Structure formats: structure tokens, C-alpha cells
Image (cartoon, rainbow, N blue to C red):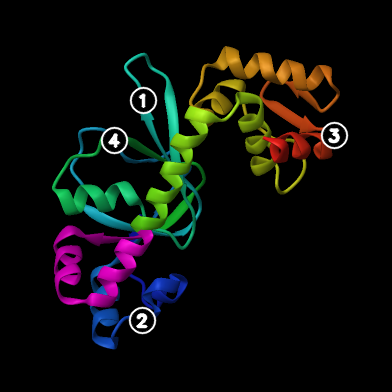
Amino acid sequence: MMIAAAGWTHQFAGLGALESATREALEAAGRVVQLPRGSQIFAPGQPPLNYLLLLSGDIRVSQMSESGRELVLYRVQPGESCALTTVCLLGGDDYQAEAIAETGIEAVVLPRAAFDDLIVRSPAFRQFVFAAFSARITDLFKLVDEIAFQRIDVRLAHKLIERSAHGGALLITHQQLASELGTAREVVSRQLHEFQRRGWIVSVRGSLTLIDRAAIERLAADG
């Protein structure tokens, strides 16, 4: 579903420096889209047609290996843009990863022609685009460092704390956790079994409950 909307730029802190004429052009060219949970935003091999700015919901960006193992690269949160879309728009490349709406989402899509025009003529818009891209690249370097150098039990502890920030049962499968961590499901299952043996969690099919959050936080901090 696509609707026209105005005044959405205030939801993006970096757009506050836009000149009034540029803001008007951006809001005139952008359209707000609403997509249900599970919608595919883009897929490998597709060309980038729009610059995306997320207003609400969550988008998961992931890449699939030749063996069929998924690695979650990052998530786009409200108030953010998609770094991979930026790369593909600027480089003229097709997507090499997939983006899925993890919840119902509302986002602004800016057609490629309007994006190209604003990048050229607006220093403030250009700064916004590259600042967002730079922040995401830093996150990706951190992910590479974690995969290469951190123990899997420490990384799993971090992920459990991160995903259970709002309390309650964590509705996630062992395979989904493995995709988040870039490892095999068997590795995650083995480590979760150890956490359960220690009395830190209760794991049932499709759900995890943190029983001793403090112990998991200590492991994450010690790593």
C-alpha cells in the first residue's frame, strides 16, 4: 500500500539540516508505503529502485551462503536507512542480500532519480546519506570481529540479552539464533543445552526464557 505523506522528515535527526527547498522536494518525491510482516523488501539479483527510510517496524537484512546458511547482517530500525540500498544506488549494482519485514512496516521510498538529484545538489542530504552509511559499516566491522574472534558462548549470551531486552519469553528458534550469529544450528543447540544445564534458561520448542539473566550478563561482560 502506498500513500502520500508530508512532514515525515522530522523523524530522521540527520534531515534537520536540510534547506527548506530541499526538504520540500524530498517530501514531495517520497511516498509512504505500508507492508505486512514477512514482505520481501528486496532480494539478490534485483536492482535498487528506491532509497528507503524506515518510519516504523523492523527489517532484517541477511545473506545466504552457498550451503544454505543464513547470516543476519543487520536490522533497519525506525529512523534509519538501509546501507545496502545506499551502496547499490551509488555503485549501480544489484542487491547481493535479502531484506524481509520482521514486523508490519511503514517506510518512505524515494525514487532513484530523486535520490540521485538530491545527492548531487544538496550537501545536507549527502551528509545524511553518508553518515548513516558510515555508522552501518562500523556495525558490520564489529560483526566480522565478533564472528572471527569471540567465543560462541559469549556471542550467544550477548544475543540473548539483546533480544530479551523487553522481558518475557523470547520467541525464537535455534535456527534463527544460528542465523543471527552466523553459525550452525547444532552449535547453538549445544550451547543452549549447556546454559539450560546451568539453570540459566529454559528452552522449549520455539521459545526461550531467561531464568538467571545476571549470570548470562556476566558471561557477556567477561567475554
SS type, badge 4: loop
**Residue type, label 1:** Met
Tag 4 or tag 2, which sits nearer the N-term?
2
Mark 3 and mark 4: span between their CA atoms?
Answer: 39 Å
Please give the name of the residue rendered at 19% of the width and 71% of the height, measured from the top-left corner.
Answer: 118
Please give the name of the residue rendered at 77% of the width and 22% of the height, measured from the top-left corner.
Answer: 195
Tag 2 or tag 1, which sits nearer the N-term?
2
Tag 3 or tag 1, which sits nearer the N-term?
1
Q: Nearer the viewer, residue 185 or 112?
A: 185
Q: Write the start and end of the magenta stretch as one range.
A: 108-132
SS type, badge 3: loop
Q: Quadrant of the N terminus?
A: bottom left
Q: Is residue 33 visible?
A: no
Q: Give above or below for 189 relative to 13.
A: above
Whether label 3 touches label 4, CB < 8 Å = no
Whether label 2 touches label 4, CB < 8 Å = no
- Which residue matches tag 2? 17
Q: Is residue 85 visible?
A: yes
Mark 2 and mark 3: span between their CA atoms?
Answer: 46 Å
- Which residue matches tag 1? 64
- Determine which of the numbered discs, if any, sits on residue 221 in the image: none
**Residue type, label 2:** Ala
Query: Which residue is most to the bottom?
Result: 20
- Which residue matches tag 3? 212
User: Where is residue 19 drawn, in percent x and y?
Assistant: 28, 85
